Image (cartoon, rainbow, N blue to C red):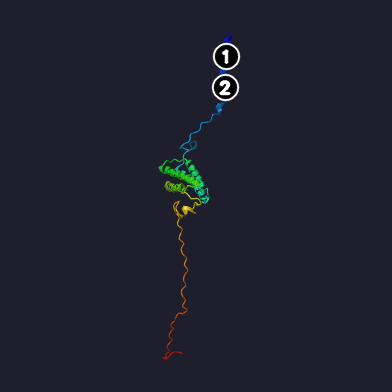
Amino acid sequence: MEMDIYMRRRLVALGGLVAFFIIFVLLVKSCGGDDEPAPQEPTGATGEGGAAPLTTQDFTAQADQICATANAAVGAIDPESPTAVREEYQITSDELTSLQQLQVDDDSPLLRRFFAELETVVASLRDKQRAVQSGDTVADGEAQAALDTAEAEARDLGSRYGFRECGQFLDAGEQPNGGGGAAATGTEPGTVPTEPVVPTETTPVAPTDTGAAPTETPAAPPEDSGGGISP
């Protein structure tokens, strides 16, 4: 008899616990329904929030604005600064990231190759920075050679695609309008420009003065009608 009472009490207590748990779950669901985040539209080739991609013309214009700003920033770097390579790497890396964020309705092989070469430019600048920091001249030279090749390829691909600024890399200290650096001398990056030849100024030689007056032939006196010479 005592055992039955004990079991009934346990069943009652267990039933109350289950009921309390069910009520608690229902309360949590009813209170948390309003806090669920709203579904977000997927992003992809159409851009942020489903925006339409840029036309090729608009993409080229916006990309050139990004590249022009990056080129000017690189040109403003002091080439003698110990952090010049690191600054150029950071600027070019940010330039690549900004270009990749542009959504364009174009999947042409030419554009993909341009981006691939620009990525190689960034990677070469990173390797050059590490070589400069470690004092490894061999690695520095290899990175510079890879950088020159990638810049030349990106310059050609960018011009063929229609860019005016993207791919037109500047050296540290070079002005966008050609005031110094490789663009001003018409040489490829990494080459030593030839000094212009200054024409030699010669002093004109004055004619030699002999001191002799020019000889004049005297005119013959008029003849007199009388056959003599007029006084």
Q: Residues within 10 Å of mark 2 (few under 14, many from 20)?
A: few
- In the rendered structure, which disc, 2 or 1, sits on the residue that comes first in sequence? 1
Residue identified by numbered label 2: 24
Residue 162 visible (yes or no): no
Which residue is depicted at the point 40% across and 42% down?
109
Numbered circle sitting on residue 169: none
Instruction: Look at label 2 and name its amino acid.
Output: Phe
Residue 37 picture location, percent across and down: 53, 30
Q: Residues within 10 Å of mark 1 (few under 14, many from 20)?
A: few
Residue identified by numbered label 1: 10
Which residue is depicted at the point 57% across and 22% down?
24
Q: In the figure, is residue 18 to the left or right of 169?
A: right
Q: In whole angstroms, how far apart are the C-alphas of marks 2 and 1?
A: 21 Å
Residue 203 picture location, percent across and down: 47, 68
Residue 127 visible (yes or no): yes
- Number of marks in picture: 2
Image: 136 above or below 44: below
Q: In the figure, is residue 118 to the left or right of 29?
A: left
The one nearer the camera, 222 or 59, is 59
Which residue is depicted at the point 56% across and 26% down?
32
The one nearer the camera, 84 or 59, is 84
Which residue is depicted at the point 49% across and 37% down?
48
The one nearer the camera, 178 or 139, is 139
Q: Secondary structure at mark 2?
A: helix
Q: Secondary structure at mark 1?
A: helix
**Figure quadrant of the N terminus:** top right
Instruction: Look at label 1 and name its amino acid.
Output: Arg
Residue 227 picture location, percent across and down: 41, 91
